[in-house]
Amino acid sequence: MSTKDSERLKINEGIRAPELRVLFEDGESKIMTREDALSLAQELGLDLIEITAKANPPVAKITDYGKFVYDQKKKQKEIKSRQTNFEVKSIQIRTGTGEADLKMKAKQASKWLAEGHRVKAELYLRGRSKYMEKSFLENRLQALLDLIDESYKVVEDYKQSPKGIAILVEAEKKK
């Protein structure tokens, strides 16, 4: 949770709504006036924290502020750790790229897929090759994909890119 988030949290006297839906630590909720909620929080030695200001009435929670912030940071950290970080690696070939070069590039793509990256295979077109038949161009790109050792799935099918025609693949999840 950044400093902006903690600044946005309204606690105790910072809450301006006259009526609140108050959540208690045991999960129960009641609609009460702001003053009643504040006095109840002070009796319990806890804080009144506004959670959702846009609800009608706004939702507040009676809990310890430090514990609340700690739990929020913990949740954010857990969400961040579950996100998969991958990079899109790029391989370029031309219509005249030789078989040995295709094998070398396919080997590199296999390595990247094994590491968990996505691979963008791009058929670079210039001059007359821009006007070749689309099926021929796709078959040329497919020749590279056929040489890849790793099992993969297509994320984005053949599409026109600024430099030519491209396809995006990623490693298939192992079950």
Image (spheres, rainbow, N blue to C red):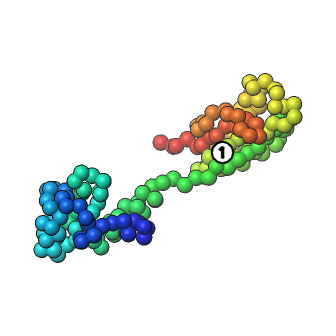
- Residue drawn at the location 58% of the way across and 52% of the way down: 86
Is 132 left, or right, of 39 in this rendering? right
Q: Quadrant of residue 18?
A: bottom left
Residue nearest the observer in this picture, 50 or 72: 50
Q: Is residue 128 shown above or below 19?
A: above
Q: Is residue 123 shown above or below 34?
A: above
- Residue type of the residue flagged with mark 1: Val
Q: Position of residue 114 (x, y in %)?
A: 61, 49
Q: Quadrant of residue 33?
A: bottom left
Residue located beneath label 1 in the image: 119
Q: Is any atom of residue 78 visible in this view?
A: yes
Residue nearest the observer in this picture, 137 or 130: 130
Q: Position of residue 75 (x, y in %)?
A: 37, 61
Q: Quadrant of the N terminus?
A: bottom left
Q: Quadrant of residue 100?
A: top right
Is 99 left, or right, of 80 in this rendering? right
Q: Is any atom of residue 151 visible in this view?
A: no
Q: Position of residue 148 (x, y in %)?
A: 69, 40
- Residue drawn at the location 45% of the way across and 55% of the way down: 82
Q: Position of residue 90 (x, y in %)?
A: 70, 47
Per the image, label 1 sits on a secondary structure element best described as: strand
- Residue drawn at the location 82% of the way across and 34% of the way down: 95
- Residue drawn at the location 24% of the way across and 51% of the way down: 56
Is 30 left, or right, of 108 in this rendering? left
